[in-house]
Amino acid sequence: MSVNSTAAVVDDLLLDHLQDIEGEMVDDVILEVILEEFINTYVIEPEMEEEISEIAKEVLEHYDTKIEKKELREISKKAGNRLMESICLEYLLSLISRQGKVWNESDHANKFLDDVILNILVSQYTNVIINREKTISNQSLKKLHEKVVSDVALDLLLQQLSSSLDEDLADVDEYERGIDEYNSTS
């Protein structure tokens, strides 16, 4: 046989084989493309949309905190002692604006409001103390309080005794098993 006839036979066999498997392969490739498109559309893209916004928020917050820290460092570096100086300057300006008077009209109003608020707070505090004393001296409430406290304490003691008894019974049972094993091996 010649080389051309051998190549022609191989070409024919290859074409026959390709035609046999062509239908299966095309169906598999089409199914794979459809499944891949479905996964991309309904699984990957929604997840990516959720994750992208979260990742973007995290990245922005990270850079925001870095920028904020940098700005605070710069402010504290430049501010230095100027804060104290500005407070002193503000005090001196307020003193000058009052023209040497110790208090101005708004200070008098503030002191009056402070007095009113203090009187209200003191009366509320006094009422709280009086009501607390009435509650403490009430015999019915005192007996109820004692009963509730004693019931809670009794429940706690019974629980502790029960757990202690369970532990002791387990220890006795273990001890008896050890004696039984010792007697059976002897």
Image (spheres, rainbow, N blue to C red):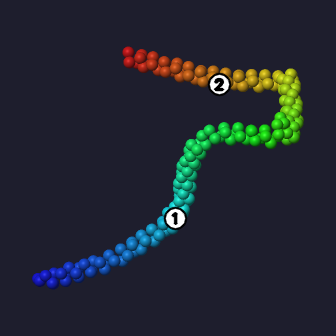
Q: Which quarter of the figure has residue 33?
A: bottom left
Position above or below: 67 against 2: above
Q: The residue tagged with tag 2: helix, strand or loop? A: helix
18 lies left or right of 124: left
Front one among 9 and 42: 42
Is residue 40 shown to the viewer in this render? yes
Distance (Cα) linking label 1 and label 2 = 57 Å
Count of picture labels: 2
Kindly identify the residue that appears in the image at 56 percent across and 43 percent down: 77
Query: Residue 104, how many percent across, how many down?
Result: 85, 39
* Three-letter amino acid code of the residue under disc 2: Gln
Report x, y in % for residue 168: 56, 19
Residue 110 picture quarter: top right
Task: Give the class, few, some or many, for how many residues have Cα within 10 Å of label 1's Cα (few <14, many ≥20).
Answer: few
Q: In the image, what residue occupies the spot 38% across and 15% down?
A: 186
Q: Mark 2 — residue?
A: 159
Q: Is residue 47 left or right of residue 87?
A: left
Name the residue located 64 percent from the left edge and 41 percent from the top edge.
Answer: 82
Q: Earlier in the sequence, mark 1 or mark 2?
A: 1
Q: Residue 45: which numbered mark, if any? A: 1
Q: Is residue 162 rendered to the left or right of residue 111?
A: left
Residue 48 in percent (x, y) is at: 52, 61
Coordinates of residue 116 in the picture (x, y in percent): 88, 35
Counting other residues with Cα less than 10 Å from the Cα at mark 2, is it few (<14), some (14-19), or many (20 or more)?
A: few
Task: Residue type at mark 1: give it.
Answer: Glu
Quadrant of res 100: top right
Report the residue that reaches farthest toward the left: 1
Q: Secondary structure at mark 1?
A: helix
Which circle, 1 or 2, is nearer the viewer?
Answer: 1
**Is residue 140 something that shows in the picture?**
no
In the image, what residue occupies the spot 57% across and 48% down? 71
Q: Nearer the viewer, residue 25 or 41?
A: 41
